[in-house]
Amino acid sequence: MQKEIMKNSSLKNKIIKHLLVISIFLVLTIIVTFPMILDFTTQAAGQGCYDKCHMMWRMWWAGFSNENNLDFYHSQYIFHPNGVSISGNLAHFTTGIGSILLNLFGNVLAWNIIWLSGFVFGGYSAFLLSNHLTKNPYSSIVAGIVFTFSTYHVVHSGFHIGLGMIIWLPLFILILFKILEKNSKVLILLGGIFLFLASITHIWFFVMLIIFSIIFFVIHIFKQKDVTNKKFVMNFSLILGIGIIASLIMFMPVLTSDVEYEQRVLNEHITYSSGLVNLVTPTFYHSSQIHSDYKLMLEIYNSLDEDIGITQSIESFSYLGYSVIFLSILALKFRYKFSWFWVLSGVVFTLLSFGPELKIINNLTGILMPERILFDYVPLWEEFRSPGRFIIMTHLSMGILSAFAVNGIMNSKYFSKKILAIILIGIVVILIFDLSASPYASHTQPISKIYEEIKNDNNDFVVLEAPIGSPQGSKLTSHPSFDYYQAFHEKPIIGGYESRASISTLTQTDKYFINNFQLRSSEKDIVKQNLDEHGLSILNYFNIKYVIIHKNEVTALTNLETAVVPTEKYFLKKSEKIMSEILGNDKPYFEDDNLIAYKISKSENSKPYFILGEGWHRFDSAINARSMYPESNIEIINPKDNEIKYSLSIRLLAVEHNRHVEVFLNGKYLQEYNISTDSVTTMKFNEIILLPGKNTVSIKADGYELLVDPETNREYKISLAGLSVSGN
């Protein structure tokens, strides 16, 4: 009985101890990110509305697709009507948790709960790992501080919610160290689970842990004492096997997809990597620089003749902290068992974070780095375009080393307990000052009143949000804020944003008529028809009920201020002109400081009109043509309920070689032509029969040339260049 009471008391004390540690990291997070806690229910942590809004949309889509029996991996609610494959990093863990929280609390509070959890439990997990190695809870608090308030975590947590959930990294590594000492099926299962959870939280974590596991295995395979090599190898293999197999099953829908994506190029790996001096350069996010007008940063940049204005990506922010560097070096004095292992781990991941070529900050040195070998020889490695993220493993290594240093100091016989307590408090205060990100930025994108009306309209329709294309991103994708608005109004939209949209998806936004609403596009196209006569019909064809023109684009600046950049005046004037031409008046349905909205009525036009179908490349204003694939379609819409006769004219020019083409209408052969490279061939079809609704004219050419698309740097198949499509 007494033993049972003592056992229960011991368990209670352990629970209280761990709850106390969690509470400490909660308080420290509030301090380091102050005043974020004051706006916790109203402002989403982090700057602007780019990646943050995209991840909020992913949370909404996870819940919405589940509730409505839709395919999570393919959404037709963006890039309507064909939709887009949801791929790249899906951040299943945070997306799934976020979808549940979003339904309970709304997107802002859901985001902030996950954001806060990343800091609190990131610190707690590093504490557990360090405490296993040092058996000192006080020094382990230091390890947690260094890890969870690292530059990587402070920066990424406000943009990439998956990358902010760093808890699984120390927990998986903790299991690896435990199997050095103990043969346990429970540990094997936990290790596999932690690796799986890391992979579905972010694929980058999976890559990091696999690389760490390789280092760990190679270093420790010959140093086993309590467990034989055979048992260690078996346990290690089972952990990786469980984690990898479970991860592959989860990612099977993406891995088996035959969707063709844009290739990632070497230059992206260079842009999204760290630089040598970045390791000792505080960032725009650190309190020390915010409150000193970035004096130290400016001094470092100026002394190296670097332009502070070309810090191209947050991926390059990798400040380690001067106090952390000092403690990590000091750790070597105390000669702990695993000190040099953690030094090796930190060095390896730091070198990987430098990407394919060493930079000072932004300036290249010409010195190749290990990541270049991975880029050149590891299949699919080019997809991992942000090597700067490897620095989180360096932060973890230095956190453990810092704990070793503090543990060594606290075991010193030269100081009394009171002095040691003061030293410990002093170290914590210095670390917090060095790593602090207060004031931490926050921003919630406001929702215009027009979206209230759209949300409350129970009819099925589509919203066209413009401009399609963004100065911050792709020319063919919308700003992520448009997806964020959709999470509110829940109606399909033309265009949209998806981080790894396929080439075929991107070209949807460059089709005839829709391309009028791109930020940068020619006002000309190969189809000749009056929008004042057919524009309303085309909008009805796409089931568009609202056209919304955004006056501003929200952006996150490096000085932590969220601002809006006005949409180019040329685009606004062009869009207003088009809508005035289509609707026959200049007055919009709704307007505020951020957008102009047009409500689309039903067309009474009974004349046929054109829509370009599949098989057309982007319009090239230089040659006044669209490149054509070996099979391309033109859709002719007959609004009447009866058949009509129609005359059609198509003008084509061959590229490189003369071509032979065959033309079909609704699958039935019409005529064939020989197309010359010397002059335009006009194909005329008189009195063809158009059925009610959609009629498809297919042009099939023999052979093709392989040319390089300057937009995507990929080869594409081309047979002809279409010059004009017109009809009567």
Image (spheres, rainbow, N blue to C red):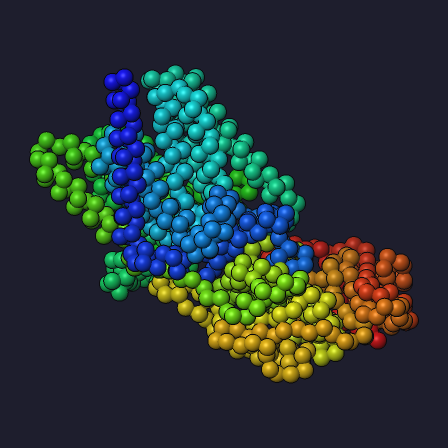
Residue 83 visible (yes or no): yes
User: Where is 604 relative to 280, above or below?
Assistant: below
Classify residue 51 as left or right of residue 67: left
User: Where is 485 relative to 64, above or below?
Assistant: below
Q: Going 81% across and 70% down the picture, which residue do you hit? A: 639
User: Where is 638 relative to 392, above or below?
Assistant: below
Residue 280 visible (yes or no): no
Classify residue 326 as left or right of residue 604: left
Classify residue 181 as left or right of residue 648: left
x and y percentages locating residue 141 in the rendered image:
26, 39
User: Where is 30 relative to 677, above or below?
Assistant: above
Q: Going 29% across and 35% down the picture, which residue do you hit? A: 18
Image quarter of residue 648: bottom right
Q: Going 30% across and 49% down the picture, which residue do you hit? A: 29
Number of labels in the image equals 0
Image quarter of residue 437: bottom left
Quarter holding the N terminus is: top left
Image quarter of residue 398: top left
x and y percentages locating residue 604 in the rendered image:
77, 76
Q: Going 89% across and 68% down the picture, which residue do you hit? A: 643
Residue sticking out furthest to the front: 1
x and y percentages locating residue 176 in the rendered image:
39, 28
x and y percentages locating residue 117 in the rendered image:
37, 46
Which residue is nearer to you in this view: 702 or 640? 640
Which residue is nearer to you in this view: 578 or 105? 105
Which residue is nearer to you in this view: 604 or 724? 604
Classify residue 470 as left or right of residue 558: right
Quarter holding the C terminus is: bottom right
